[in-house]
Every structure is written in C-alpha cells, then in structure tokens.
Amino acid sequence: RANLTADAEKIRTVCSYCGVGCNLEVSVKNNKIQSIEAPEDAAVNAGHTCLKGRYAWRFYDHPDRLTTPLIRKDGELQPASWQETYQYLADRLQAIKTTHGSDAIAGISSARCTNEENYLLQKMIRVIIGTNNIDCCARVCHSPTAYGMQHSFGTGAATNSIEDLKHTNFIMLIGANPTAAHPVTGAKIKQKVMKGTPLIVIDPVKTELARYANWHIQLRPGTNVAVLNMMAYFIIEAGLVEQAFIDNRTEAYQEYKQAIMALDINELANIAGVDAQVVKAAALAYAKADNAMSFHGLGVTEHSQGSRAIMSIADLVMLTGNIGRPGVGMNPLRGQNNVQGAADMGCQPHQGAGYFPVNIEENHQYYQEHYQSELPKEIGYKIPEMFNAAIAGDLKALWILGEDVVQTDPNQNHVIKALSNLELLVVQEIFLSETAKMADVVLPGSSFLEKSGTFTNGERRIQKVNAVVTPKDGCKTDGQIIVEMMNALGYPQAEYHPKTMLEEISQVVPFFAGVTWDNLGEDGLQWPVNANGIDTKILHTENFKRGLGKFHFYPFEESVEVTQNGEQFPFILTTSRNLEHYNAGTMTRRTGNEEIVSEDILLINPNDAKAKKISDQQSVRLFSARGEITLKAQLSDKVNKGILFTTFHFPELMINRVTGDVTDAETKCPEYKVVSVDIEAA
Ligand code: SF4
C-alpha cells in the first residue's frame, strides 16, 4: 500500500453506506483509486472505518457498471444516446401528464445521493411535473422516527451528537444492532460499555451488544410498546420521575400517568414474553442515571406500532429529564448515509424542503414564492400508495433514483405487479439492479466517489462529499442528469454545481440558513445552522421546537399480521443487516465482501429445529401468506423459540417474497420486523 499511495493525491470525502457518515481519505493516482483510509482528525470517525467503507472503492470500477443510457425497445433494454433518451423521456412524460394529469407521475429519491441531488429531484417532480408524489426510503425505515419525534418534541431528528457518548453514564439501545449496521458507532458504544457504562438492550435477537448488556430484554418482535409502557410504569411507581422538568417543559403528563398506572404489568410481561423483574431493574437503573442516552433503530420503527413506540421512547426521555444537555437525548441510528438529508430536502409527499407541510396555505405560498411557480397543494402518494395506485391504474409513470424497490420493499410480488402495470418506469442507477431490469429507461448515474455535494449524517451533520475521480466513461453525476432532464422538459435549471445548489437550498430550508460550501470545512456543520453559520450540537436545550414536549400514551396493540396469519403461520420472522453487507447488497456484493459472507442464512432456535426435524446447515422452505423461499438454516440460541431471523442482502434469496403489507398506522412504514411464517425441511 505504501508504494501504491506514495505519490498519490489524497482527497477527503464521506462514506455512502450507513448514517454514521465516516470521513474517508481516498488515495488517487491518474484518476484511479489506490486505497481508502480513515483520517485520524475526522470528527465523526477519528481514524476508524468498517470494512464496508474501507473497500467501498472496489464497486465503483466494477465491470458490471452501467455505462450508457438504455431504452426498452421490442421488449429489450437497448443502448441509446443521452440526447435520444432525454427527448424520449420528455415526450413520454409530457404525454402522460397531458392524458392522465400530473398525479399520474411520481418519483422516489435516494439516500445514496447528495442533498443537492435529492433537492433537485423533488423540485423537478413538484415544480415541473406538478405533483407532490415524491418520497424516499425514509418511508421504509425511519419515517416513524420523524413522525413520532416531531409530535413529541417538534423535530424529527437526533437530539444529540455521537461524541456525547463521552459524557453519558448510561446507554439504552432499542431495536438496533449497531456493531453490524453502524459499526463505528457500535464500536464506540462497545468501548464505553467495556469500560463500565451500564447498558440496556431491548431486542428480540441476542446481538453482539446484548452479550455485553447489563439487562437484555429479549422481547417478542412487535411488543416494543408493551415493554416501554412497563418501564414507564415502574419509573412512575418508584417516584423516580424528574418532576421539575415535567412541570416546566412538558404537557399532557397527568393523562399519560393515569393511563400508564392503570396497566396490568403481568399481562404486558406475558404479551412481550419478558421477565417483569428484569424490565423493572432496567427501568429503575435508567431513571437513576445522571445522564442517559437512548439509541434506537429499525427494530423500533418497522412495526405497525412504529410511530407509537417512538413516542413511547420520547415519553421515557421526558419522564427522566434526559434531554437538552450533553450525554443524554434520543438518538435514532439512521440506516443510510443520507436518509436524513433526503427527508430534509423535501423528498416526502406531505412536507417540502425544510419540513413545511405542503397542504397548508401559508407554506404553499412560501414554496410558490421561492420556486416562482404554481405548485400542487394536495399531499402526494407515499411509496406503498404509489404501488397500490399503479396496480389500480391511477399511477402511470415512476422515476426511481438509486433505489432497488424490487429487492428491498415488502411483498415483492405486489411490487413487481405494480411496476409491471406502469406505462413508464425510469431508473437512475449504477448497476442493473432487480428494479432496473424492469425499467423502460435506465440512466447510468455515478457513485459517491465520482460526485461532489453534501450528505447529512444521523447526527444532523452536513458534510462535504468531494469527487475523487471523474464519472466513468458514459456516466453522468445524478445531479447533472436531473438538471439536463429539467431542461429537456423546458425548465431553465442552472447547471449542477454543489456550491450554487447549496445557495438555493439555504434560501428555502431555514435550518440551512448559514450553510455555504466554503464554511462547511472538514468536519461539516450540524443543523440548524443560523444565518451567521453557527451550528447546533444539542437540540431542545431551553425549549422544545414545539414549545412544550408532549406526552402520548398508546396501549399495546397486536399486529394485524399476527392476528390474521399467526395461527396458520406460527413463527415470527424478523430481519436485519450483517456487518459485511449493506441493504440490497448491490454495492457490497461487488467489493470482495461477498467472499466473506456469500448468502443470507436463517437463524432458528435449536428446540424449534428439533421439533421441525431440521439440522444445522440444512436447506429449509420458509413460507408465508405471500410467498416462499428456500435458504440454509443455522441453529442458534440468538433467537428464542418461535422466532426466526435472517438478512436481506442477496437477490438469489429475495426475502421480500414472504414479507407483507402491514404498515405503521401513522406513516405507512412497512412492518418488516414481524412476519408470520412457517418452515419445513426442504
Ligand atoms: Fe463508517 Fe458506516 Fe461507512 Fe462503515 S458503513 S465506514 S461505519 S459510514
């Protein structure tokens, strides 16, 4: 490596996998990447990366990269010039808009792409197409976090910074496996716990951090609200609430307290399959800690009670006054590098850039003035609604930027049926993903190593992404593609440049007010950034964004998936990531990581395996009300009896053939974490 990087140029950029947002120092010689290292002085990762970031450069130059636009002719995707492709798309989109109206067109944006690219796509859909049918992958991961925290605190983002781990003396981790999914943050938590900081893990799976936890509450998937309500009960019963904080800074406490204290704790413990005394010990320790930080992941959000569980965590945070200072707070571990940014930039059907609801007259005027254009006022389709509308024949065209919905969205047969029913499917991608294979038009975009802009990580940190090589021959940056498409549709959008795009964004998004390309520096800025360029490490220090923090009580409700399908399909399948791979695996299966982990494996409790006559490493048939797959079983006590676990990184498996249509009541985030299934030896 020393020889390779000796006279190489070193360029700093940001990893495009998880929401930790590690800084990477890339060595480049003659437009070829030699290696990736971690800068010691990076605020986020201080010399660390995981293997995903360290070897990320291998996928950008992979022979599978798409290098020319493709248009489907005579049933086959065939190469076309950029000029021909833009003209074809402009004609088709105009024709659909004229015949069926603007709402027959929709867009799905990408957490892999920069803030500027996300901003541009929602602008194209809203201003030029004329619909609010724009959404992003936050819909299928942390939309309940945004909804719940907005209702409790007023802002749907992490309240503190990861560096606050230095100041905390208690950690509560709910529905997250950060040593696999957010490895650099996971390592920081592990180091802290190994030095003696108490840890609660609430998770149906015995994760790596569960092994280090003082209390592992191994609940049945889907029962977070039951356990969180139990914790609140024990804290209130013991008189450990932070009464002055509750009196001065919150509302609706009395109603909440009354509802919590009326609960039947033994019944909830039975529902969740947990020991009430363990929950009590954990709850009291959390309440007694001077400074307690909570972290949560998709094990909280991807449930039919996802938003309600988020508000229940917020209740615990407010009960104990653990908010508004260093070393405390409620911190969602955002799954994707720029999912925070995609939502911030308005890639949501109900809120525009900066989170103003689009259907309120005052906001509608605000956006119309900024864009100098007539805008739609009706809330658009969320992603699951887009698929339903396509099947119903109401949605005719869908533009997907860097998302593989066929592999990653639930109930794959339903998704395929929806995409097949469209008149026009456009996919902007770097590889021919399972979704791109179905497209009518494929546009070859660029990876993070070939583009400049900004990503916003899970602690609201806006960081510069710097192109380290030029786009591969035949490819364009995604920002440039969208700008050229906007112009082809007759809108005079200026040429893509991150600096000028940031200027435009800072005029629309109030919490970007003082963000400029030049003042972001090496370590970035955490929003809100005021007009003087001063950023914010901790939210809600004096007041909540909504004024007073609000308590919400929700009783536990069994998932419809279990009540409808549980008898016929008695096992509960829950899914997550492993360390080596990232989501659909489109990138990590092309970096050498596929040689370390080459398939998705099903974990099954040895008692269940014995009852089903399944041996270790045997192929099993896994089936649900939606479909079936075959995969290899591994006997493991990481899961309790009746629970199965697997990952979703390999298209050969397609776990989403078995997942279902149940969604979070408030946001329509799919319930990936509770899937009623059955198994048998294959
Ligand atoms: Fe850091 Fe996450 Fe990238 Fe790993 S995947 S290097 S933890 S940002």
Image: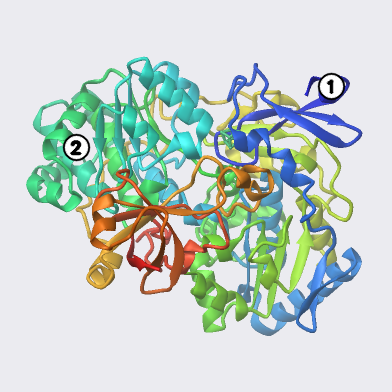
Quadrant location of the N terminus? top right
Q: Which x, y percent locates residue 422?
A: 63, 79
Residue 531 occupies quadrant: top right
Residue bearing mark 1: 3
Residue at 52% over, 83% down: 392
Quadrant location of the C terminus? bottom left
Residue 569 occupies quadrant: bottom left
Visible residue check, residue 373: no
Q: Which x, y percent locates residue 666?
A: 37, 58
Q: Amino acid at mark 1?
A: Asn
Left or right: 647 in relation to 79:
left
How many numbered circles are shown? 2
Residue at 68% over, 48% down: 113
Residue bearing mark 2: 231
Q: Amino acid at mark 2?
A: Met
Q: Quadrant of ligand 1?
A: top right
Q: Gap in Å between the C-alphas at discs 1 and 2?
A: 57 Å
